[in-house]
Image (cartoon, helix red, strand yellow):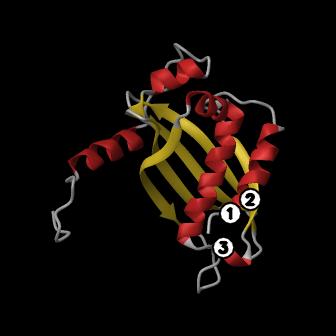
Amino acid sequence: MFPIVRLLKDLWRASRMPAIDLTETHVSHHICWPWDLDIWLELNNGRAMTLYDLGRTMLAQRVGLIGALRQNRWGMTAAGTTVRFRQRIRGFERFEMRSRAVAWDDKFIYLEQSMWKKDGTCASHVMLRTALTDANGIVAPERVLEAMDLAGKNTPEMPDWIDAWRAADAQRPWPPMQDGLA
């Protein structure tokens, strides 16, 4: 079940924080609750992705994207992701999440998020290719920037590791073959 109470609480918190630039890092703090656990009593990988959703929503609030979404009746979606899990987050453990927009191209906005334990170790890291959509499909980031009063803002240079992921993903067959083998 989607944590709607957490979402509302986090949006309320983010709406009271100062605005940040599109590429600045939003930092939020979370607790791994019992309903976030898997059978090994650690943060479930699916729930981790849901918590990353919450961090992205808070980031969207602080950079002014939520207003543009509402005004233009746009949706926000993940169009691809790659994730690394490296450290367990256990029940009741507190952790910090960092979320930021890294760069964008003609279709997608690339976001980077990470979860950090109290001892300073990174528990997980995710890169997302995100898109804003309307009734006609994907809304170009250029148009999104205009709606956010950021027209003409140049994209930061695409990091090599994200560019390599984009190139590798472009070689992946789509749609996949029905038997699951490319």
Name the foreground residue: 147 vs 181: 147
Would you name the residue on which mark 1 appears? 3
Q: Earlier in the sequence, mark 2 or mark 3?
A: 2
Q: Are marks 2 and 1 in contact (CB under 8 Å)?
A: yes
Label placed on residue 166: none
Element marked by disc 3: helix
Q: Which percent across, then down, holds residue 173?
A: 19, 53
Q: Is residue 52 visible?
A: yes
SS label for mark 1: loop
Q: In the current view of this chain or complex, which residue is farthest to the bottom?
A: 39
Type of the residue with mark 3: Asp
Q: Residues within 10 Å of mark 1 (few under 14, many from 20)?
A: few
Identify which residue, 117 or 136, lies in the foreground.
Answer: 136
Which one is closest to the eye, mark 2 or mark 3?
2
Question: What is the spatial separation of the Cα atoms under label 2 and label 1, in whole angstroms?
Answer: 5 Å
Residue 113, placed above or below residue 86: above
Cα distance in 3D space between marks 2 and 3: 12 Å
Q: Which residue is mark 3?
A: 36
Q: Residue 115: where, in percent of width, then height?
A: 64, 58
Q: Amino acid at mark 2?
A: Arg
Which residue is at 67% across, 58% downward?
116
Residue bearing the label numbered 2: 6
Q: Is residue 91 left or right of residue 132?
A: right
Q: Secondary structure at mark 2?
A: helix
Q: Is residue 126 left or right of residue 161?
A: right
Other residues around mark 3 within 10 Å, as few (<14) / some (14–19) / many (≥20): many
